[in-house]
Amino acid sequence: MFRKIHEDHTEPVKLRHRIRNKLEVAVFFGLCCLGISGCSRRANAEIRQVPDEAPAQSAGNNDSGQMAEIVRFDDELDGYRPAKENYNFYFTYKVDHPWWDAVAIGIEDAAKQYEEKGITIDYEYLAPDAASAQDQIQRLSDASMRDFDVIGVDVADVDIVTPVINELIKDGRKVMTFSSSDAAKEDGCDRIAYVGNTHNYEDGSDLTEALCEKLGYKGKVAVLVGTKGAPCHEDRALGVQNVIAKYQNMKIVEIEYDDDSVEKSYRLAQKILADHPDLDGFICCNMSNPVGTARAVIETGREEEISIVGMDHDQEALEYLRDGIIYALGVQDCYSIGFDTVQVAVKIADGHLPGDVYPEKTEEITKIIYQDSAQAMLQTLYGETD
């Protein structure tokens, strides 16, 4: 058997229960057949992008007949044969948030599939209620004193956490990074491997290009970043700034950090809207701030004036996308991040270094989706049928 410990919860809160509802709805309507056993999920979030020409022309065209299934669930273990029958992993990430609940589902399903092969995967999956590099350091230190085969970390701050990772490696611990925030070799980090998003800069760039196109390459925008020092958020913000700098009639009027908090992003967006009555758009660099921003825009009645782009699969954000409040979302393959993290951790535990058995960086995908894809995503992830 395997176990997962999720701090202050017996299981990931929102997404897991809603995915269970999604599965029940899907079976009821005969849309798919997925097996559920215990608390595992047989799923693969392979995100398929709507056509590149989607932005201005087809957003909102739900009757085009071109709508494909956006998320399908079928990841399977590769052909690697584990050297042991029992593994014990520790995974810690930036903050307790539904985004990482989706990663957890992939972790669980990989563990379940190993169990079916007679391999026991024990793991702990823990994070604080608020992002903190110092908290992460303490968790890594505590984990290093216990008998884990591999320690995995979604890095809260590269500069602060990298020396701790390097010290653990020096002491003989096997440490990998995962999720959306790597501390890479070029950052001076000695971590063994990384599984996750390797293109956060490009994600920020792609979302910004979509917004600039919608605005006719003319307008004032604000940027909500997320957690200061988090590689994924900082890289996306850098991509945003570099794209805006290309267009002389585009201008960033504010850059603010919301600490992955819906409420804080809401308050920041309120202030930005009040301070900049001629604002044209928001670029949101994490999963929380599109929600907070959309709430603030709706409250001010400026839905027709303000264009919002942002990240990921929050249910409320997808509803805003469906309703035309949010223009575009970049959706990451969270499920495969979790699934592949377990596969790589097994190989690291067996003593393999990056090479033929697994790469130093396992790259997962992000796709930009628009209004015409929102309802399919809501149905697939959350069971919303209308």
Image: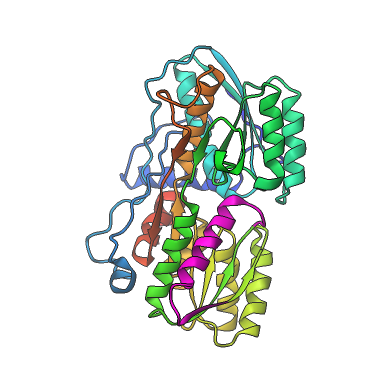
Q: Is 109 above or below relative to 330?
A: above
Between residue 95 and residue 254, name the one nearer to us.
Answer: 254
Percent across and percent down for residue 270 are 65, 77
Percent across and percent down for residue 81 are 43, 15
In the picture, measured across the screen, residue 28 lies left or right of residue 291, that is left
Residue drawn at point x = 59 percent, y = 57 percent: 234
Between residue 214 and residue 325, name the one nearer to us.
Answer: 214
Image quarter where the C terminus lies is: bottom left
Q: Is 124 above or below relative to 327?
A: above
Q: Is residue 228 magenta?
A: yes
Q: Is 225 above or below relative to 336?
A: below
Residue drawn at point x = 34 percent, y = 69 percent: 55
Question: In which quadrant of the rendered view does residue 205 lie?
Answer: bottom left
Q: Is residue 95 visible?
A: no
Q: Is 118 above or below relative to 264?
A: above
Percent across and percent down for residue 323 are 43, 71
Between residue 365 and residue 124, name the one nearer to us.
Answer: 365
Residue drawn at point x = 28 percent, y = 66 percent: 53
Q: Is residue 196 magenta?
A: no
Residue drawn at point x = 40 percent, y = 79 percent: 217
Q: What residue occupies the far left of the structure in this picture?
A: 65
Q: Which residues are magenta?
A: 227-252
Q: What residue occupies the far bottom of the structure in this picture?
A: 277
Way the structure is coloured: rainbow
Percent across and percent down for residue 74 are 36, 35
